[in-house]
Image: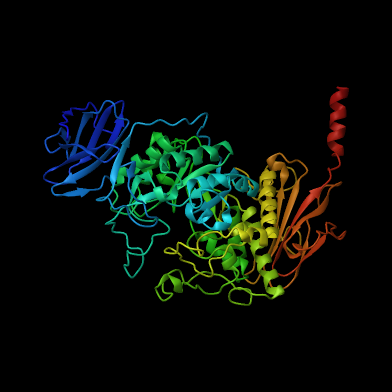
Amino acid sequence: MAKAFEIITSKNIYPMGVSLKDGILHVCLERAGSAFGIILFDSKKTELGKIDFTSAPHVGKVYYGDINLKGYKKILYKIYADDKFVGDSFMRNFDGKSEFGFPVKDDEVYFVAEDSSYDWEDDDFTIHPYNETFMYLMHVRGFTKHPSSKVNGKGCFSGVAEKIDYLKELGINNIEMMPVTELKKNSKTVLDPTGNLNKINYWGYQNSYYYCPNKSLAKSKDAPTEFKDMVKALHKNGIELILQFYFPDEVKRGEIKDILVYWRSEFHVDGFRLKGDNLPKRMLNEAPELKECKLIYDYIDKWEIDETDEIKRIASYQDDYMYDMRRFLKGDEGVTDIALRHMRENPDEFGVIRFFTNYYGFTLRDLVSFDRKHNEDNGENNMDGAAFNLSWNCGVEGTSRKASINKLRMKQTLNALTMLTFTQGTPLIFMGDEFGNSQKGNNNPYCQDNAVTWLNWANLDQNKALFDLTVKLFAYRKAHQCIHPSKALRLMDYISCSYPDLSYHGEEAWKADLYNYNRHVGLLFAGKYAGENDKFIYLAINMHWEKHDFALPNLPEGIVWKKKFDSDEFDKALKEDISDEGRITLAPRSVVILESLGESAPDKRNVKRKKKDLNA
């Protein structure tokens, strides 16, 4: 028999939604009809009572009150408006079916309010500076759903946790995770030009239940706890988590901050990648609750950044690097100087996220294997997805058995990863690019929940050479501060050490020919600017289809050049000898990393000066 519940006037309006704490159910809802309220159920879905909130205390359209539920640690509820059930935008969990890629059927499920605690142990909110961050863009389901992943929690938060050792071996320390909240029906978001909302929404860019982790991404029945377990495990291994949120215009701007604060405090998320056309950037950047987490936008103006920030935590996530560097990679004319500018850009006010590939567009393997998109399986006659990809198939469209083409594709992949490694700001790779994942030429797999979008981990064994070299490149960046400093490189000798922090070279030392037809250049990094006294690193890039000579800049007496990497000889034992003539020849479409070896001879003038000081 249903009980009679009395609304107790609450001292606080917030938090919004329905929450249970110490036997008190707090209800705070926006009025949804002429008569509206809440119906309570026990864990067996037996109705406990119906409470009308039409006459409850209210501020504007927000009605609120407390209900005594002593003895209950968990309660199920539905919200009614007139003669129908409606969703609770603030619900934290629900009892019912969650089908991946489709909205919650809010008229069929029971929302859940639960009084629970979680032991975070010694978890903290320490974040990595942008110049020390290497990002890995991931879709939770696609990362481990394929049987070859060999994890227990396939396609789930726990599956990500099972792959932490792999992520650490790769060398990344930051995951950017695509949307993980439950989708809401009746969203105004249109998935594709045909308006077919019956397709699966694989990516999750749709209006959502923003406080509720997606149950279909959890192996257990408790998605919030499984998500927290994953975050805690990532943090213990030095990996921070950036969570993507897409906010269409229908989401109230004032609510966005509350959503981010909730995920920051409740789930210990380290930052947010925010997408949408109507974001209150200045308000979010100034929010004190978000002062120690990363906020990343498609674009940021300097005036939108809070000048009182003590750390650089705001970042820009633009496509300009991606498109221009793709042009440079395939040998287009007139972009060498543009590529150099992108590689050294590192503003003082905000971070910059840099990438060759992302979830939208080709994977890195497809970038060097296809000239055209192949999205026929999406059901739109290949009309969807970007037609402008700046890709090059290296001679044959799609897969090839020809050794010369496969070698060229491997070289181009390594060329891209090497240039990304030497790029200032924060490099990012899309999951699977480190071992040649392909989407079969589909550059817009928004509705593909299958082998197209699931990582095939068998490719890790088949492309082990690519993975191993990727690991070495990422480790090389981490080991040398001079190629990823915290401040922008100035191309000047501002510490009077006879070398600029960064300088450009070509067929003549200290002279880079940046004419439109030029596609090769050398970059010299001086280690003294980062505390690496006698360290010099030279990156030679030749994106031309012809070989080119480079004149190597002279080093201090006692130091010689040693080759550390050559993308043209990735399949051979590395030849470390450098010509005594101070020159090096690069094969077509290749990059070479040279590193100084030895210690410089002491400056005789300094020795004499020290002796005089001692005699004095």
* Quadrant containing the C terminus in the rendered view: top right
With respect to residue 519, does 292 lie above or below?
A: above
State whether residue 272 appears in this view.
yes
Residue at 51% across, 32% down:
124
| Picture coordinates of residue 236, whole percent (x, y) | 57, 36
Along the viewing direction, whichever of 100 and 391 lies nearer the viewer: 100
Residue at 61% across, 73% down:
399
Q: Is residue 436 left or right of residue 218?
A: right
Say which quarter of the image contains residue 506. bottom right
| Picture coordinates of residue 20, whole percent (x, y) | 30, 32
Residue extending farthest top: 616
With respect to residue 609, does 168 lie above or below?
A: below
State whether residue 317 appears in this view.
no
| Picture coordinates of residue 76, whole percent (x, y) | 28, 39
How was the colour assigned to the protein in this rendering?
rainbow
Q: Is residue 538 left or right of residue 117?
A: right
| Picture coordinates of residue 582, whole percent (x, y) | 83, 59
* Quadrant containing the N terminus in the rendered view: top left
Residue at 67% across, 75% down:
401
Residue at 51% across, 64% down:
451
Say which quarter of the image contains residue 38. top left
Along the viewing direction, whichever of 221 and 510 lies nearer the viewer: 221
Along the viewing direction, whichever of 528 and 176 lies nearer the viewer: 176
